[in-house]
Image: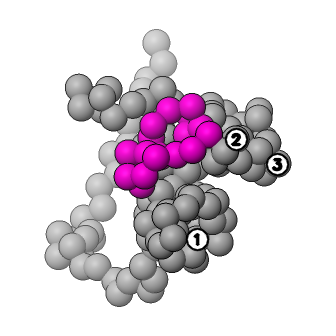
């Protein structure tokens, strides 16, 4: 039988008041949610889809155009979902014409690798059951 050495590491120096203390925030990092897979991540990892003030839709990789925005992560499956379902219509509250759906797929074809891991199959309905 091999003796089992258990070494308990208790850091007595870590007092509760020290744990509570928060350092000053250096930078506010905006977090966004992918409208297709609901994954949350930093804004800069997403691609913004914008409803322009003129009422048209545009892919806005810089994230700087004015208008109501929705975000898609860089998973090919999410762009397919955005093109084939109403997730963008619900997020932007505007009908998504077929031409823009085609544009989404073209953009994904050009900018996103198809072999990236697929998004988890999570829909808002499934989320509600959790
Ligand atoms: Zn996604």
Residue 42 seen in this snapshot? no
Q: Position of residue 32 (x, y in %)?
A: 44, 59
Residue receiving disc 1: 63
- The single residue placed furthest to the right in the displayed view is 110
- Give the mark nearest the N terminus, 3 or 1: 1
Local crowd size for mark 2, using a 10 Å CA cut-off: few (<14), some (14–19), many (≥20): some
Does 71 sit above or below residue 61? above
Q: Is residue 128 magenta?
A: no
Dot 2 and dot 3 residues touching (CB under 8 Å)? no
Q: Kindly report which numbered mark, 2 or 3, lies closer to the viewer in this rendering.
A: 2
Does 84 sit above or below residue 38? above
Q: Secondary structure at mark 1?
A: loop
Residue receiving disc 3: 110
Counting the numbered discs, the total is 3
Residue receiving disc 2: 102
Please indicate whether residue 103 sits to the left or right of residue 96 in the image: right
């Amino acid at each position: 039988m091999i003796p089992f050495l258990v070494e308990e590491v208790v850091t007595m120096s870590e007092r509760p008041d020290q744990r509570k203390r928060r350092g000053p925030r250096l930078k506010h990092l905006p977090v966004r949610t992918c409208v297709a897979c609901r994954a949350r991540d930093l804004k800069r990892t997403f691609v913004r889809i914008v409803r322009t003030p003129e009422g048209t839709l545009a892919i806005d990789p810089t994230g700087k155009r004015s208008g109501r925005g929705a975000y898609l992560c860089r998973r090919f499956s999410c762009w397919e979902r955005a093109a084939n379902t109403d997730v963008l219509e619900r997020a932007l509250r505007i009908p998504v014409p077929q031409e823009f759906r085609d544009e989404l797929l073209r953009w994904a074809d050009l900018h996103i690798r198809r072999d990236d891991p697929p998004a988890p199959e999570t829909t808002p309905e499934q989320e509600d059951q959790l």
